[in-house]
Image: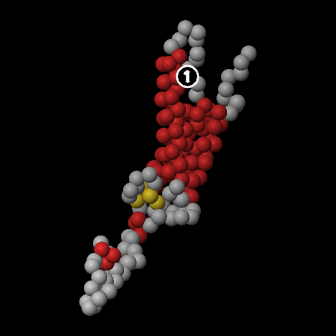
Amino acid sequence: MGFDNLPIHHNATASPPPPPPPVSTHIPHRPSSLLLHMSFYWGKNAQVLFSGWPGNNSFMYGLAVTFVFFLAILVEFFSNINIVKQKPDSNRAAAVFFQMGIHSIRAGFAYLVMLSVMSFNGGVFIAAVVGHAVGYVLFGSPIFKKRNQ
């Protein structure tokens, strides 16, 4: 509520309203464990997918990199499988819903790989790229596909 609605008295001296409190620009101190990198870095001290994981443990970092590698392979697997063979007398709605489920799983795994890469850790990035490459060779390239004869 401002002074616009108050009656005006010529003999009264009104003091101006108090100034607003100062705006604090203080940013609280962040512990170094919550430091988020905005450029690629090398090292095992990363945070991949979950808060505090893998932490400072070398074994857990190796497990996280391996997890991202196999997750990227699974993305390529789900991108290149064709389980549903359309037959004339088959239920098309069931086939569409099954393919929708496969597509949803693939998209979820792809987002997990993307979020892992967003940790900006060089090892995680390389694991994701190599995992996609290996998955493509295994499931998408013509090397291992049967030829139609």
Instruction: Identify the residue shown where x is 59% and y is 52%.
Output: 126
Identified by mark 1, the residue type is Ile
Residue 106 percent across, percent down from the top left: 52, 36
For residue 24, which quarter of the picture? bottom left
Q: Which residue is mark 1?
A: 83
Image quadrant holding the N terminus, namely bottom left
Circle 1: element type: loop
Residue 12 percent across, percent down from the top left: 25, 89
Residue 93 percent across, percent down from the top left: 50, 19
Is residue 33 toward the left or the right of residue 76 in the image? left
Front in this rendered view, residue 86 or 69: 86
Is residue 26 toward the left or the right of residue 101 in the image? left
Task: Give the vertical position of 28 relative to 111 (above or below).
Answer: below
Task: Give the vertical position of 35 relative to 23 (above or below).
Answer: above
Q: Is residue 65 visible?
A: no
Image quadrant holding the C terminus, namely top right
Instruction: Identify the residue shown where x is 71% and y is 18%.
Output: 148
For residue 11, which quarter of the picture? bottom left
Front in this rendered view, residue 56 or 5: 5
Task: Give the vertical position of 103 relative to 91 (above or below).
Answer: below
Q: Is residue 113 visible?
A: yes
Task: Give the vertical position of 96 relative to 61 (above or below).
Answer: above
Tell me how the rendering is colored: secondary structure
Instruction: Identify the residue shown where x is 52% and y is 39%.
Output: 107
Residue furthest top in the image: 89
